[in-house]
Amino acid sequence: MKRNLVIISSLLLGALYASTACAQQTGLAPDQNPRYQESQDRYLMVADSLTSQQGTTVQDTYKAYDWYEAKLERRAQRRNWRHEERMNNSYYSDFYPSLSFGSSYYPYGGYYGGRNNLWFGW
Amino acid sequence: MKLNKLLTVTALAASGMMIVSCSSRQVTRVNTDETIDISGSWNNSDSRMAAEELTKNILSASWISNHQEDHQGKKPVVIVGFVQNKSHEHIDAETFVKDIESSFIQTQKVRLVQGGKKREELRAEKADQQLNSSTSTIKKFGLENGADYILQGSINSIVDAHKRQKVVYYQVNLELTNIQTNEVVWIGEKKIAKYVKN
């Protein structure tokens, strides 16, 4: 009796497995990879982020070396350095005008001093 | 003393404004088909040339008739993917890709579906309708047209410069791929070379 029960249940399980496998087979399109579900699950998770830039231009530019533009850039940089040097030089700094009117954070002639400010006669 | 300073600053500001207003800026409307090269960089003429060439090629290529043969005469549905600008300049491909999209609709040879942020907005609107619209006017989820092909592209450049001379070469590539099979069914390209002397 017990042996019969085991045989019947194993037959039932076998039939269930076979029917499931058959159903899965029929769900596939002709020549479709049977593991397509793995790939589908993987891309379902990231589809939103991967399609967010559709219809746009992704800027992945590089800086091309241009002899003439590099020369102009060097010149501009030198000018900028000289200007900053002058600004930090205490000899010149007192000659720059102040627009603070004595009531701001730098009350006596602004950030660049101003005690000898020629513009306002200080 | 304070009044003196105030007057000086006002005078300076007024003279500055006068100088600005006296500068001779002149603006003239020009025809968008006219080629005006100023700096030698990518400009509207390049975009227009790319659009004309690529539109002509994509609409006359055999992929449309091949698709219709395989799908009982149905028109192909295309979605526009992204274009990667790998050149040395900031170039927005939308200026010529929009011309191509427009030609799809005007010629009625190809159907177009929205993608990216605009599609997100459409879905958000649909979601909003589920709560706020009258039942007879609600648009349902799950009835979008699935695209058959995706249009993708790239822009590349080569710069050869020495002293005051420069040759810039641009290559714009667009390709159309079958989404089901990943088969590339069309590739279009536009090459532009410029000689610039400073």
Image: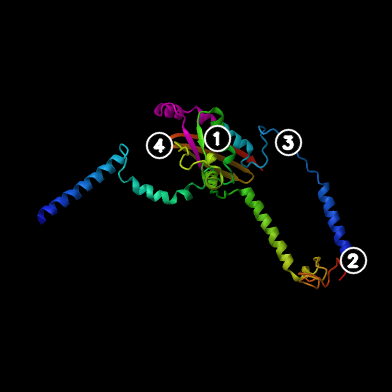
Q: Are marks 3 and 4 on the same chain?
A: yes
- Residue contact between numbered discs 2 and 3, judged by CB atoms under 8 Å: no
Residue flagged by tag 2: what amino acid is it? Leu
Q: Label 4, on which residue?
A: B183
Provide residue A82's location: percent of width, then percent of height: 71, 62
Q: Which mark is residue B101?
A: 1
Determine if the magenta segment contains residue B64. yes
Q: CA distance from mark 2 to mark 3?
A: 47 Å
Residue flagged by tag 3: what amino acid is it? Arg
- Residue contact between numbered discs 3 and 4, judged by CB atoms under 8 Å: no
Chain that bears disc 3: B
Residue at 80% across / 69% down in the picture?
A94
Q: Which mark is residue B3?
A: 2
Q: Closer to the N terminus: mark 2 or mark 4? A: 2
Residue flagged by tag 4: what amino acid is it? Glu
Helix, strand or loop for disc 2: helix
Q: Which is in the foreground here, disc 3 or disc 1?
A: 1
Q: Are marks 1 and 2 on the same chain?
A: yes
Q: Closer to the N terminus: mark 3 or mark 4? A: 3
Horizontal side of residue A80 vs A92, given as left or right? left
Q: CA distance from mark 3 to mark 4?
A: 45 Å
Chain that bears disc 1: B
Q: Label 3, on which residue?
A: B29
Chain that bears disc 2: B
Helix, strand or loop for disc 1: helix
Residue flagged by tag 1: what amino acid is it? Glu
- Residue contact between numbered discs 2 and 4, judged by CB atoms under 8 Å: no
